[in-house]
Each structure stands twice: as structure tokens, then as C-alpha cells.
Amino acid sequence: MGLDVWLLLGAGIVIAAVIAVRVAHWSGLPSLLIFLGFGLLIGESGFGLQFDNPELAQQMGMIALAVILAEGGLTTTWSHVRGAIPTALVLATVGVGVSIAAVAVPVHLLLGVDWRSALLLGAILASTDAAAVFSVLRRLPLPPRLAGILEAESGLNDAPTVIAVMLLSAGTSPSLGGALFEVVFELVVGAGVGLAVGPLGVYALRRIALPVSGLYPIAVLALAFVAYAGAVLLHASGFLAVYLAALVMGNSRMPHRAASRGFAEGVAWLAQIGLFVMLGLLASPSEIPASVIPGLIAGLILVAVARPLSIVVCSLLARLVRIDRLGWREQAFLSWAGLRGAVPIVLATIPWAATSIDDATAKFMFNEVFVIVVVYTLVQGPTLPFVAKTLGLSTPDEARDLEVESAPLEELNADLLQVRVPPTSKLQGVEIFELRLPADAQVTLIVREGRSFVPSDSTRIRVDDQLLVVTTAACRETVEQRIRAISRRGKLAGWFGERGT
């Protein structure tokens, strides 16, 4: 086929995928399954397009995951995840190790898989998928601490799992001490690179006046890849470097930050579409049926045993060292919310591309992982809102970011918050002046029954109202805590000791 035909085909797939995102959002069906379906449709068992290059798939997959992690870092609000970082680090390190072992032992005993392959399968499945978690968090209102743990964990646990899969796929098996040293080295150096590139990038962007505003988002994404490539060249974790560099830049006052975030979000969606379609192309539908039963068993072990066990162990550890205290409801939700997506499928291409592992074994493992991701994403993703509501963790009254590309807001160092008042909220009946927001914050608009108006101090808040609150960045956290406190306990929340944290 000529270049024009490829361009037309690629553009058609992207347009269809964009429409599919809307369908997925409306139906609750995870969009990644639709994208994988596109790949299967145009692949060898559909339109006949051949793609069987695991080495190229691995390289392209790693780049796409780096883009997704960069977008995740840029759009993560540091104040939301700051308190969750210690717990997320435990989940991303100790939790990964527990998950690998908890998958490997039953798979070895029940399915008769050799120890190396069982450990490799456990490592491939150990990482939660950043794209899947980020997309769920954007439409599922959760308590800030719980959302922060999920968000930070998904951004941090790719790095140790990639290292584990690389070590297990290598031709030689390192000693336990050597493996631990390599893991620590890659994580420490990767973190150092990311934390160096991020502040330096912000410093440069503040002082270099680019002639076109559209160059700033490109520069931000390029800086994120400087961190990724620099860490890889130092034999360190590029994933950790790109996530931390983007996290620093996304939470710094740099020019056109909102535009940079929007650009990164669009590029990340394009990377997700291309990644899932490519992985769908790489799969062979005729070979998948043989992997269904083993895949379902391994997936059940992951969801019912490994993930809950890793959460319980990490929760006990966090409590022992006094960094966090997770209740049983939060542990239950974290266990069910360990979504797998593109990351395990991309990681499954690493042993397939390695020369030290039998090609048939690696291909069978890839098909197993493919089955696990499709089936259990279909089961877990749409049920998360129901699980959160059943456990009493859904909080629709939480203040949410509303991204606005507006130069005055940036110049005023201000943020715009959107708050919807649910039926259970005690914001109902409270007058605007009774909110007692800081002097640097103001309820500027109320949207009620499709009509918007500017409220007065005596305007009473009603159920289903949407409040737009303008606040300076310095007092934003105080504003969110105050609104949450009143929503929980009413206008006398302070008297009851409720601080909205």
C-alpha cells in the first residue's frame, strides 16, 4: 500500500477511536477494549493486515507508555497526592514484590509452570495501568487520599515491574543481592534524573520567552523525554524519571501550564489509541483460545489473591511504620481497583522479544496476559463506581479541577474549582456568606437547573447546584477542606471538629 493509503487508514482509525471514547464513556465500557478490538479487526483474522514483530512492538510500547506517564505526571495535582506518596511507594515496591510471589506460587503449583515462567508472569501482571487508572479517577469521585494513593501508585509502580521483567527475561539469572542492587540503583538514579530535569525545565521555560505560545507545550513534552532518555542512557528507570519530571513541571507556575496539560492529554490519548491498536494487531485470535483457561485461572489468582494480599501486607507495613492507616473499606476498594491495561501486554512483549526464552512459551504467555487484561478489565472497570458506592467511598461533592485556558487566571496565580452539591450534602440550605471562605476565594457563579447566575451573600445553596469558585493557588487547599467540611457536617462543621481533610 502507498503512503496515502496508510495515512487514510491511520486517520480513519483515530477518528473511529475518538468516537469510540464517547461511546465508552456513555456505556461504561473501558475504551482500551474498543481500541484492542480495532486492532483485532484490521489484523490477520480480520482485514488481513500482518504485524508479528514483538521487538518493534516492545520499543513502540515503551515510548507510548512514557507519553502516558508524562501526561499523568503533568495532570496530577501535587496537593492531592502529597500525603499519599509514602503509601504509594510501599505499594509500588513491597506491593509489587508480594504480588509477584502471590501469583507465581499458585501458578507454579496449579498450572505446572516452571518457576522462572511463573515469576515472569507474576512480574508482568504486577503493575497497575496508569492510563486505565487515570481515566477512571477522572470520572469517579473518591476521597482525595484514596484517589491520591491510586494515582501515585499507578505512576510509580511501572518502574520496578519493568526492571523485574527485564531481569527475569535476561539470559543469565542474577543473584538476589545483585538483583536488589540493580533495582535500587535504577530507581534511585531514575528519580534523581527526573527531579533534576523537572526544576531545570521550569527554570528555563520561565526565562526563555518563546515567540509562539504553542511552542511551550511542545517544549514541556520534549523535556519529559529528556528525562526519560537521559535515565535510560544511564541504565536507570526512564519511566520513573519521566513521571517525576512531568510531576514537577505540572505543579510549577510555568507559562501556559493549562495549554501544556491539554496538549499532553491529547498526545497521551493518541499514544493510547496507537498502542492498543498495535497490541491488537500483534495478537493472533486463532491462538488465543488455548490460553483462555490458563489465563482466566491466573487472572483469578491475581484479582482474588495477589492484589488483596499485597494491599493487606502494605497496609500493615504502613501502619507499623506510622505513615498511613487504611481502613478495611479502603483496602477492599484498592484491591478491586488494581486495573490492568496496556502495561502488562507491553511487558509481555519483553520475554517474547528475548532470545533466552522459548518463542512458543513467550507467545503463549503473551496470549495469557491478553486474555487476562481483556476479561478482567471488562469485569472490574465498569463495576468500580458501584463498588465505591457500596463501600461508602463515593464522594460526588468533592471539589474538582476545571481546566480553563485563560491568561488572566495564570497572571493572577489563581485556580477555578467546580463543586456539585449531591442530595446527601449538608451544603443544602447554607447561604454563601456562611461558607466563610478565605478572603482570597469567592463563589463567582452558580449553575442551577440549566441557568447560571452570580450569587449574592444571602443566596442559599440547593441540591444539584454547581458552584464555580475562584481561589488563589495559595489558599486552594484551605478552600477545598472548608467546602468538604461543611458538606459533611453543615455550617457548624468547625464546632464538631470536622476540618475537611
Image (spheres, helix red, strand yellow):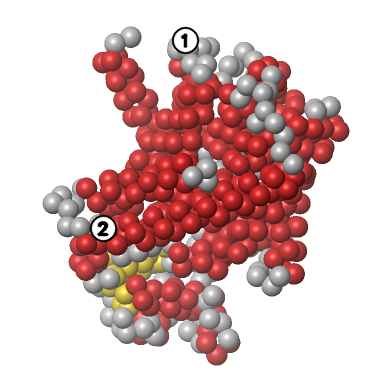
Q: Quadrant of the N terminus?
A: top left
| Residue at x 29%, y 62% (from the top left corner) | 203
Labelled pair 1, 2 in contact (Cβ < 8 Å): no
Residue 448 seen in the figure: no
Label 1: few (<14), some or many (≥20) within 10 Å?
few
Residue 47 seen in the figure: yes
Q: Is residue 345 left or right of residue 135?
A: right
Secondary structure beneath label 1: loop
Residue type at numbered disc 2: Leu
Q: Residue at label 1?
A: 48
Please provide percent x and percent y for residue 55: 52, 23
Residue at the outermost right position? 109
Is 345 situated above or below 130? Answer: above
Residue type at numbered disc 1: Gly
Mark in front: 1 vs 2: 2
Q: Residue at label 2?
A: 205
Classify residue 66 by image quadrant: top left
